[in-house]
Amino acid sequence: MPDPNSVKEIDLTPIPGKKYFDIEREWREEFIYFLMVDRFQDDTPRPIVAHASRSSGITTPNTFFGGNIKGISRNLDYISGLGCTAIWLSPVFENNDQAYHGYDINNYLRIDPHFGTKQDLIDLVDAAHNFKKNGRPFPVRIILDVVINHSGDNWFYQGGFPFFYFNDQIFPFGDFRKGDRPVPTELRNKDWYHRRGEIRDFDRAPENQNGDISGLKDYANDDDAIGSDVINTLITAHCYWIREADVDGFRVDAVKHMGDLACSRFCSNIREYAYSLGKRGFFLFGEVASSSDDIYNRYIGQNTSKQDGNNTVFFGLNSVLDFRLAEGVFGDENNAPLRDVLKGFKGPQTLFNRIEAQRARALNRGEIGRYLVTFVDNHDSFWQPAGRFANGATDDQVIGAIGFLLCSLGTPCIYYGTEQGFAGQGSDNAMREAMFDKAPGGKSLLNTQCPIYKEIAKIAEVMRTYEPLRFGRMYYRQISGDGHFGFPLGFTYTLAFSRMLYPQEVLVAYNVSDEARDDRIIVDATLHPEPSQMRFLHGKSGTIPVQTAQSGARFVKLDLDPHQFVILT
């Protein structure tokens, strides 16, 4: 059947005889692998690099390189071997010329031919849902990256000149760049776009709501008749992919720049449609590229709404990407980026502040983990001027960083290549290296012998096995080098926290320092009466005794190598 061109041609009744995928596993239990489809793998088998060291990613031109959906399907064993249980794909719908990243969409109803076909996506989702690891069912969820705040650069302003936002002025429409784009055809209406020119201040309203992100054209998704038509069209177009491919979630791009009602209606209708198919766990998480908890609190948690006059606006997202943790607050020493804390450049106070800021979001401390997707690096350079996390980091530091994500509150997400030590720096494209060399004689970089890959896989298995690391309350622990306990300060210390799920405690510790440390770390006295021991689950073997300080506090003494990461119970 040919791809539809209009939402009027879309049938949203369930496919006859199809049982849509549903699973009881909560999203905070997942370990998400975020990959750039164009850069991960293509469908050509290649020899795989196999050495006990990290690799440098393959440098690519700033255009399509050749990765595709079949390349992902062929390598589900690699992703699952890392311990990942969900895959977030960069946008796969048809894009304008050279937009390998997928965020310049001109056709919402067709897979970009560079990436494959609709059937390729269907096959990937089916293979992921039915994947077996070591002979046992290991279902993997598939998340699509969706762009509904704006279209691609599908039309130009009058005269063909760039226009920039000014006093919310509407600028004259020129024409569509192609006669048969965008798709669906309903989007070929000049009044469906704000036409305010490019944003210059991304944090000032209404500019950040009505302006274009660079050349990408902002939809007129306001609370009016046109806005209703726009968002209904986008809802139908995206429900089409749930029906056809049985995908499990959407990462919603540029949420901060969407109208409140548009975000609410899209998320609510998408979730309702998934429910109607029997998919009870459809995941919607948003990109809110901001370090403001006030903005986060509008979107997530038990208070995920705001008042608009006498009306309540419900945003409908399950979760957001935790830029506040990853990026920190610029210029604030006590709210530094996570990467700087874990590399020993900044103190740990930012982490203590972060968890306290989340108290209002959940009905209890353990539920906080539902509302944030955590990460240390990703595909955008604007917030990480030093490049990927592995740039300037040792293997042990990379392992410690991903270990922190896996064991702390939130849904952990790893950016492809981090597990191989990719260290791209500079432009966006420099941090989107390829994992395969398509030159004659080139190899695949899906190296399962890389120490970073192997250790992350081990930590992920511990997380998967021990419920406190998925559902437990989280408490940062006081430490002591001389018997006087307190929360760590400075840049050389053992960072430790417990995940508590009654009646069990799992202790996680990471030596941030470049030197060995032997700190004492507080543990729960009620759960560890005398005499008792804690057993290593990762990083070391054997057991250590729980001791009692003069104050009566209970602690364990950990001897850790530089940047060593351990887990105990």
Image (cartoon, rainbow, N blue to C red):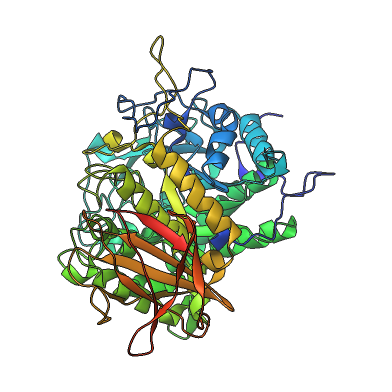
| Residue 282 in which image quadrant | bottom right
Q: Exactly how many numbered labels are in the figure?
A: 0
User: Which residue is nearer to you in this view: 40 or 451?
Assistant: 451
| Residue found at the far left of this picture | 331
Judged left or right of residue 443, residue 514 is: left
User: Which residue is nearer to you in this view: 547 or 446?
Assistant: 547
With respect to residue 241, does 68 lie above or below? above
User: Which residue is nearer to you in this view: 64 or 548?
Assistant: 548
| Residue 443: percent from left, percent from top | 43, 19
With respect to residue 106, does 224 lie above or below? below
With respect to residue 543, does 74 lie above or below? above
| Residue found at the far top of this picture | 440
Judged left or right of residue 334, residue 221 is: right
Q: Quadrant of the N terminus?
A: top right
User: Which residue is nearer to you in this view: 177 or 60?
Assistant: 60
Q: Is residue 317 something that shows in the picture?
A: no
With respect to residue 412, does 118 lie above or below? above
Q: Which residue is painted at 30% across and 38% down in the image?
A: 431
Q: Which residue is painted at 55% across and 51% down in the image?
A: 461
| Residue found at the far right of this picture | 17
| Residue 356 in which image quadrant | bottom left
